[in-house]
Amino acid sequence: MKLTLVLLVAVAVVSTTFAKTVPSGKRSRLPMELLGGMFGANFQAPKVPKDYVPNPRIVEDRFTSRINHFDPQNRDTFEFNFLWNDEYYRPGGPLFIVVGGHHRTSPFFIDETHFKDIAALQGAFLATNEHRYFGTSVPTEDLSSDNLRFLRTEQTLFDLIEWIDFLKREVMRDPNAKVILHGFSYGGALASWARQRFPNIIDGAWVSSATVRATVNFEEFTEDFGNTIRIKGSDECYNSIFRAFHTAENLLDAGRTNIVSSMFNTCEPIDAENSLQVELFLHLMTLSLELSMFDDFNIENVQRVCNVLTDEQYETPMEALAAYLKDRYSEIRDCFDLSFENFISILGNVSVDAPQNLEYGLRQLNYHICTEFGFFQTAKSRDQPFGSKVTYDLFLAECSAVFGEWLTQEVLYDGVRLTNFHFGATDPRVTNVLYTNGGIDPFRHVSITEYTNLLANARVTPAAFYTEDIRAISGMDSEEMLETKHMAEEYITTWLGSPISPFRK
Ligand SMILES: *[C@@H]1O[C@H](CO)[C@@H](O)[C@H](O)[C@H]1NC(C)=O
């Protein structure tokens, strides 16, 4: 026990020395999950269960694609990963693809899912790709801003269709095979856009929580999170969080920084004069709650956290919140390091092998959202409990601190505007796409929840959370969830059926 303490002190001393430049030791290392959350990585893909054993029939391979599909003078190529499984394939059957998004690929995404079960029924060939710049599919030697210029949605769509063409011709040896896409989050948006842009190549897409509407200010997220706390926790819990955040803000405004800093155990006193620092602090507190309450995407965790936040042993809501967070992170670090510089240094690492990039894709993801999507979880709305100070200034400051001064507010807004302009946001006018969302998934606010078009539809499963509907049918499914899953199956079957011929007599 003593030895541990001595070691801890030693680590703290050493890392104080280095804290300004290199994140090292326990003190300044932010937990990866928090970092992931801060930069949006935790909602990129469903969590692969720890006990998941990959199906031995799934094979890994590499595909060679062009780095820049739009420049005939640049013939440079790179390789990306893909996984496939032909155990359900019957000759003449279709190709079923799970479109890779902002995450490493995993065999789990074409295994143990409802989409796989539909594939098995249809005699389909199953495959999934790793998105350029993620995992081991990085086209450049490092992730410098200059090298990230080929991280564009348009480029990715061309990687996708050329790989699909290759699978049909060279692997399935059936150039006429029909193609059905599936995807979640941004991967779902890509699947929808692929059908929109290449109806000659893609026959249909079922997408779950597809984030098709780019937005700088994603204020609906915090509103929705607050609402979920009311529904799954209680009004009392919501009010407790509301008071905790407002008390902290008022104390900081009044210059009583030390009370807040010591209660929340920050490594250095919060600099109340520095608005970015204050925003960062509040945003991290919100995120820590989000990560605890949405842990493992099990929404029942809200109640568990609320029990602590409303426990009568604490004198004030702020104290309860601080105690909860301190306890949650006690094993990972001994204080919260909230310096903006420390934060930026983690995203600043351009190495492909740095765990934040290899495992979580943090730098890549951030480049892409800073240039095309936004989705910044601000506290602009009055109808949420997480204070009032977190604005997009924080995220914009991050974007330009990490990638360069060229990344201005104008660049960010223009990127978001063009994404919506090019793909149509919530009115993409596509056919043969089914959009599914969960009734308590905050991402439904940037997805499509109502849509009626030719062989296209949208459905929201009440009380369901983020990507719950992609899992295989189970005895735990609600009636409504079963209906969603059957609907996906029916749509896919329809898309694969013979088209109605205008020449039929
Ligand atoms: C970036 O990450 C790599 C790999 O983890 C590490 O070796 C390197 O020291 C890091 N660079 C900086 C500047 O922190």
Image: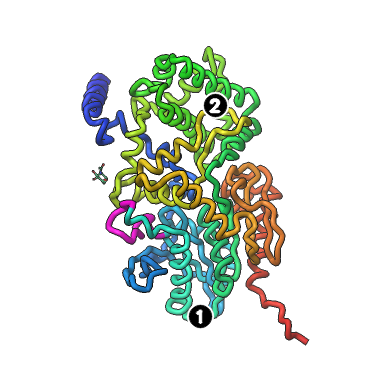
Looking at the image, is mark 1 or mark 2 earlier in the sequence? 1
Q: Position of residue 122 (x, y in %)?
A: 59, 70
Q: Residue at x 24, y 29 (%)?
A: 15
92 within the magenta span: no
Q: Which residue corresponds to mark 2? A: 387
What's drawn in magenta, residue-wise? 132-145
Q: Residues within 10 Å of mark 1 (few under 14, many from 20)?
A: some
Is residue 82 among the parts visible in the rendering? yes
Which quadrant of the view contains residue 212? bottom right
Q: Residues within 10 Å of mark 2 (few under 14, many from 20)?
A: many
Q: Position of residue 50 (x, y in %)?
A: 43, 46
Q: Which residue corresponds to mark 1? A: 175
Q: Residue at x 64, y 60 (%)?
A: 434
In the rendered view, tell whether residue 154 sits above or below residue 503.
above
| Amino acid carrying mark 2 in the image | Gly
108 vs 389, nearest the viewer: 389
Q: Residue at x 44, y 59 (%)?
A: 152
> Which residue sits furthest top?
315
Secondary structure found at label 1: loop
Q: Label 2 near label 1: C-beta < 8 Å? A: no
The label number, if any, that marks residue 374 in the structure image: none
In the rendered view, tell whether residue 10 sits above or below residue 75.
above
133 within the magenta span: yes
In the rendered image, the quadrant that contains the C terminus is: bottom right
> In the drawing, does residue 6 fall left or right of residue 241?
left
| Amino acid carrying mark 1 in the image | Pro
Of discs 1 and 2, which sits in the foreground? 2
Which quadrant of the view contains residue 380? top right
